[in-house]
Amino acid sequence: DKIKIFAPATIANVGPGYDIFGLALENIGDTIEMQWTDKKGIHIHPIDGFPDLPTTAEENIAGIVAIEMLKQQKIKRGLDIRIHKNVMPGSGLGSSGSSAAGAAFALNELLGKPFSQTELIQFAMLGEKATSGKAHADNVAASILGGFTIIKGYEPLQVFNIPFPENLHIAIVHPQIEVKTSDSKKVLKKELGLDAVIKQCGNVAGLVAGMMGNDFTLIGASMNDLIAEPIRSFLIPGYKEAKKLALENGAIGCSISGSGPSIFAFTEGKIKAEEIALLFANFYNNLGIANKVYCSGIN
Ligand code: HSE
């Protein structure tokens, strides 16, 4: 009657895969506890970290997801949700997505698993819609399925995992300035010319082939993005220099995590990731911008 789960934070887009690629991080994410209670309604308890988290179920991402799932199952029991949030909302590391995904996954377990994984992703997407205005699935799919995920299509939703190199590691820096997904979705161009579409498709295909074939050179060469990066990079102070620094020091690729402001770099091996994370931290410290760095594998 009680469950505690870990919902990984995620990197969405992963270079050229705007709204279609996602990956789950190791040891970075939310912990969610759920249990039935005799007290009617859904009760949200943020445990630590971020005091601004809404506690009204209708306004809380985990609450929004739970309301819909209980409604579909016609269940009126009281529910306690305790959320330990470890990733700052608005970081670009799928913070809202991990609460939504974690809530969907945990409640499905409590209910005796009536829903499929695809259905859980769809419930979690409701949380994303509430935060960013658009029900993108790249963060929540990666958080629920783990690993490297691809959204093949949204109508109907079709999601799957692909393998990735074991030795692929990630250095992440979160420069602590605020970028809202809803705003940073609005600034993107609605159309792309044919030349750009051709390049983007080539990079998407190259990244998938590189991941599946353990080809670090191909992964690196395929990380360019023509949809989000050219525009969103202007919202992140020091982005171009930070990327250059990572690439000059042996990272195989570097891009914006989700809608930013976090930046991630792929490396071959953990030691290189730690080295790049340190360079990122020094770089932002020198700019006088508070920052947090992480190193991770894909979970
Ligand atoms: N694919 C989404 C976007 C992810 O780039 O807006 C947001 O985290």
Image (cartoon, grey):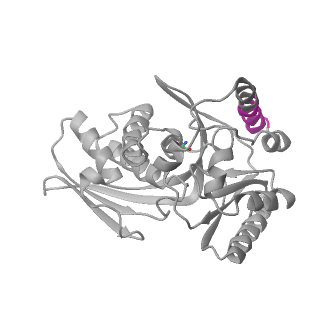
Horizontal side, residue 191 vs residue 245: left or right:
left
Please tell me whether residue 18 is drawn above or below residue 174 in the rendered image.
Answer: above
187 or 245, nearer to the observer: 187
Q: How many marks?
A: 0
266 or 107, nearer to the observer: 266
Please tell me whether residue 283 is drawn above or below residue 65 in the rendered image.
Answer: below
Residue at 28% over, 53% down: 59
Image: magenta residue range: 202-213
Residue at 41% over, 42% down: 133
Q: Quadrant of ligand 1?
A: top right
Q: Quadrant of residue 20?
A: top right
Q: Position of residue 192 (x, y in %)?
A: 65, 29
Q: Where is residue 180 in the image (x, y as percent from the top left)?
A: 48, 54
Horizontal side, residue 152 vs residue 97: left or right:
right
296 or 51, nearer to the observer: 51
Magenta region, main secondary structure: helix
Q: In which quarter of the image is residue 23?
A: top right
| Residue 63 counted in the magenta span | no
Q: Position of residue 203 (x, y in %)?
A: 75, 34
| Residue 212 counted in the magenta span | yes
129 or 187, nearer to the observer: 187
Please say whether residue 1 is visible from this viewpoint.
Answer: no
Please say whether residue 218 is visible from this viewpoint.
Answer: yes
Horizontal side, residue 36 vs residue 15: left or right:
left
Q: Where is residue 171 in the image (x, y as percent from the top left)?
A: 70, 60
